[in-house]
Image (tube, helix red, strand yellow):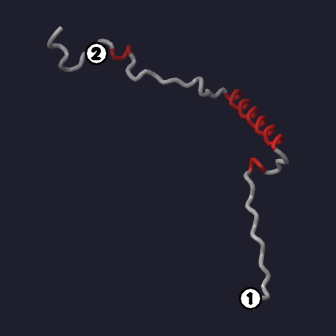
């Protein structure tokens, strides 16, 4: 019974979604450029801050800690 069974070919794995429908390397680079432009446009429209706008704030802001003497600082000048 097993000898008469037909063997099935192995299924092809799906290509990545960014490569589906892409014919050649030139088309792929063009599509990447279009996607990058679309992402930049979306960020600009929403007014989101990019990596250049981020900052590290001061851990001890001077205006909050000035004039505050800790315990044990009054014994000498």
Pinpoint residue 20: horizontal percent, then vertical percent.
Answer: 79, 51
Q: Nearer the viewer, residue 76 or 29?
A: 29
Q: Residue shown at 36%/17% (left/top)?
A: 64
The answer to whether marks 2 and 1 mark residues whose Cβ atoms lie closer than 8 Å is no
User: Residue most toward the bottom?
Assistant: 1
User: Residue most toward the right?
Assistant: 23
- Residue that numbered label 1 is attached to: 2
Other-residue count near label 2 (Cα within 10 Å), few / some / many at <14 / 14–19 / ≥20:
few
Is 14 on the left-hand or right-hand side of 26?
A: left
- Residue that numbered label 2 is attached to: 68
Q: Residue shown at 15%/11% (left/top)?
A: 76
- Residue 65 higher or lower than 19, as above or below: above
Mark 2 or mark 1: whose residue is earlier in sequence: 1
Q: Secondary structure at mark 1?
A: loop
Report how far apart the C-alphas of labels 2 and 1 lie in the structure.
88 Å
Q: Residue shown at 55%/25% (left/top)?
A: 54
- Residue 40 higher or lower than 21, as above or below: above
Q: Residue shown at 79%/35% (left/top)?
A: 34
């Amino acid at each position: 019974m097993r000898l008469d069974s037909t063997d099935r070919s192995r299924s092809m794995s799906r290509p990545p979604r960014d490569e589906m429908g892409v014919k050649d390397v030139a088309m792929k680079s063009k599509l990447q450029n279009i996607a990058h432009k679309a992402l930049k446009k979306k960020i600009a429209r929403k007014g989101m801050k990019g990596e250049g706008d981020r900052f590290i704030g001061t851990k001890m802001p001077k205006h909050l800690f000035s004039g505050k003497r800790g315990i044990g600082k009054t014994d000498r000048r």
